Amino acid sequence: MKVNDFVVRFANVNGTGSASANALFTKAVFRMGVPVTPKNIFPSNIQGLPTWYEVRVSEKGHLGRREGVDLMVAVNPQSMRKDYADVVPGGYFVFDSSKPLHPSYKREDIIHIGIPMTELCNANYSDARQRQLFKNIVYIGALVSLFQIDFGAIEELIESQFKGKEKLIEPNIKALKMGETWVKENFDGEFEMRVERRDLLGDKILYGGNSACALGAIYAGATVAAWYPITPSTSVVDAFSKYCAKYRVDPDSGKNNYAIVQAEDELAAIGMVMGASWNGARAFTATSGPGVSLMNEFLGLGYFAEVPTVLIDVQRTGPSTGMPTRTQQSDILLAAYASHGDTKHPLLFPASPKECFEMTALAFDLTEQLQTPVIVMTDLDLGMNDHVTEPLEWDDSREYVRGKVLTSAQLDAIAKGSINGRRTGSPALPGRDGSDETAGEPLQQFRGKFGRYLDIDDDGIPYRTIPGTHLTLGAYTTRGSSRDEYAAYTEDGDAYRRNVDRLARKWDTAKELVPSPIFLNAENAGDGVIFFGTSTYAAIEALELLKEEGIHLDAMRPRAFPFGRAFREFVDSHERIFVIEQNRDSQFRSLMMIELGVDPSKLISVLNYDGMPITADNIIRQVKKAR
Amino acid sequence: MTFIRSTFRHPALPKNDLGYTVDYYEGSLSTLCAGCGHDSINAAIVEACWEMNIEPHKVAKLSGIGCSSKSPAYFLSNSHGFNSVHGRMPSVATGANLANRDLIYFGVSGDGDSASIGMGQFVHVVRRNLNMVYLVMNNGCYGLTKGQDSATADAGSKNKSGHENLFEAIDLAGLAIELGATFVAQSFSGDKQQLVPLLKAAMKHNGFALLNVISPCVTFNNNVGSTKSYDYVREHVELTGTVDFVPISKEILTSYEAGSIQELTMHDGSQIHLHKLQKNWDPTSRSSAISAIHAAREKNEILTGLLFIDENSKDLHSLLDTSDRPLNSLGKDVLCPGTARLAELNAQLR
């Protein structure tokens, strides 16, 4: 008997309403306190093509994908032959028996469970659309019975799902019962899998990364979002829009404390974000690889003109249009060095929806502290699937870190310095974290004249002003062309070099500001392993399984680029390091070689790039092969 | 242009209501060619802003890339400027405007910047009716890269080396009217008398105000055979009428012969007094304006003046129903839902 440890896959036709029915199964398992991971495997299509929904249930809390399907619900004739073959020996094949299976479906190593879904629906519903939709609920009802899922748990879910549309509750429950009753009355075989109630989830939540990014932007005070539709990032702005309607409409005036613009393309989307950020609002855009390609020009401007920008890159399978609805971690190099000339950009690598929330919020602080674009590197798996994740947290005393933005009074104080020609009492400068304590020497260092690109604090980060701040002081022109410390256009080679050297100092500062890596299993012995983002689930599972076989790996999960001191120390203290990533060309490994000069021979790639989330089995195979 | 600028200012220079002399509205020294039309336009902007008592820090100047886009450095040095990337000024202006609805946005672009590389953004900023002045310094050629034809060069127009342009010109003013622009004017850099009131009206317009200004390139496109040369433009300009701009604070003193002027009221109550010279043309009618443009084109005339205005224009902020307070002024108290709401959300996700 497999208790709380199996994989169920639903093979559907997209556009038939299966998604919400299948999600009921996941949510019911979740409500029973058992770790569960759903994956949407969907086509780039609206209606009529095969789509799958795979649910892994894992008592041990392994949240990555696992190979092998223990039970297949096959209701799509187009993909049925392959779906049939995908069931592991000893597994189960659930199908619609309203029509007999073709005689060639004759595996003897699996158990066939035929349920007359169409017949049941045709007999009970007259409306064609209902007949279609409730077939999905009928098989969920059958699974409830087979897996012994709490009927009450699923009933509750249906009730909350149709809150406000109560008319739909009754027919849904009816369909659920039809499936359940049919199994009870007709299935007399052995069924060796079961969901048992546990308390393994504590206060965890089931949430998707794209929604979490959107909520992070809400909490961080983003007021402007500009975007262009692209899978798999579209639902970031959809969610932002939904949360804005909920949290950002002024209760008195009814007016919106936000602006969302669907741009004409990704170039315009990021241009709008830069315009808004330059003008003192917090703004962001979300896109995927093809959009990042288009945004390269503006990312270079943002780097050189030092304009805050938050970009959420929900990575998908490239290159070109690639597989738009499949996952990958293949924009690493594109994002790190986006644009011409010497450019580089801080990247954040969330590994869970909770981190999507936190890192998006953090990105707004970082981009304003550093005055440079910051890219949140999530992916389709994280963004468009629900994940069991820690509950979201926020500290009400947390202030937005706006970085070095001069106020009107501070500009006056700077100017005073020039009149008196001596040190004057002046307000403290805002330091790197926005507090007064870390402020460098006060405003006199400007020596009477505001200079947009002076490195007053020796951290590479200059002071900026927002348009409209002061009647007569602090105006300057932002440009992508070379300029001197006072923002005047120049083609003087020395001034240019001073400026880009300062940007390099700023890059060093960024290393201290971005989140540091997480270390696991640290015994400082044997080989090391590095993984990030959505490879984390499978990597952690692989580490556990390898340990059972006596193979120990020290692990580091980087959470950001640029790499800081702790990252380098980990690399230096291991002879050999496995680098797990989901792309063909070992992009993260390349980044380590470029930035840290790591000897390539000590970095062994563990790769997955078929568009599906990486599995622990896959990692283990590759690690063992290399050892 | 001159490399030496006098710092002497006559002590009796008149001051505007804010107490500033006109030089406070000037920019840094122009690096454009001597005689460039763009410098005349810059001078008109300085004059218009000074006369309008504009507070320079309440203006943001934005541009793309090209000779025209260098211009913002040469006026209003006490305003913030953003010299962005080629053809992308409209998007930067859109974001800036969304962040702070209280500033005046002055976008400066050229014919390459708007009609070629930036056509996509130009078209969409018109559609969104962003509250900005969008000034095209239109010379029919790429000056910074030494004189290639642009997309506004007329078919048959000859460049300096005698090469004839084969392709039809894009008419930005006509296109803007088609796209639903709410303020479209056309002018000539050599006609400051017309340009200054048009600039004033454009700044007061509540929405997208296009000023397509023919601004000859003295270096690369001022030759015989060019339809954007000073001589050609002077000979072919056809005034739609003359324009007076009357700010709301000013008492209307000028008296006009009854029926000789059309009074157009702006969003804030200011007025445009239009002395129409063209018959059968109504600047508040889109179709009438388009017909007038087509008729002029058939006669090889360049129609100047205020071509079209929608007095009831609703800008992007009105369309999006954004807060009256600038978004960039909202703090954490207004923007962050806080922990209590987060606890509710967590509960809903279990």
Image: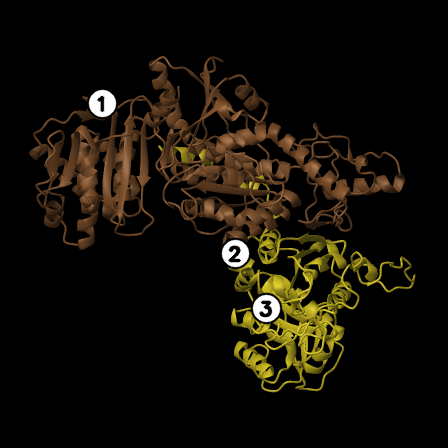
Chain colours: A brown, B yellow
Label at residue B321: 2
Mark 3 belongs to which subunit? B
Which chain contains the residue that carries disc 2?
Answer: B
Residue B141, position in %: x, y? 65, 67
Q: Disc 1 and disc 3: Cα gap in Å? A: 71 Å
Q: Identify the residue position indicated by label 1 in the image.
A: A3
Is there one chain holding both mark 2 and mark 1? no
Image depth: mark 2 or mark 3 in front:
3
Q: Is residue A582 left or right of residue A35?
A: right
Whether labels 2 and 3 belong to a single chain: the reply is yes
Residue A68 seen: yes
Q: Is residue B329 above or below residue A551?
A: below
Look at label 3 and name its amino acid: Ala
Tag 2 near tag 3, CB within 8 Å: no
Rendered view: A47 above or below A568: below
> Mark 2: which amino acid?
Asp
Give percent across and percent down for residue B146.
Answer: 69, 63
Question: Secondary structure beneath disc 2?
Answer: loop
User: Label 2 to label 1, Cα distance in Å?
Assistant: 54 Å
Quarter where residue A202 is shown: top left
Query: Are circles 1 and 3 on residues that touch, CB within 8 Å?
Result: no
Kindly indicate the quadrant of the structure image that contains residue A64: top left
Q: Residue at x 57, y 76 (%)?
A: B284
Q: Quadrant of the C terminus of chain A?
A: top left
For mark 3, does the 10 Å Cα neighbourhood hold few (<14), some (14 to 19), or many (20 or more) residues? many
Where does residue A11 sit, x and y in percent of width and height?
Answer: 23, 41
Residue closer to the observer: A627 or A169? A627
Q: Looking at the image, can residue A402 be seen?
A: no
Q: Height in image: B95 above or below B297?
A: above
Q: CA distance from mark 2 to mark 3?
A: 36 Å
Label 3, on which residue? B151
Residue drawn at the location 58% of the way across and 48% of the way down? A298
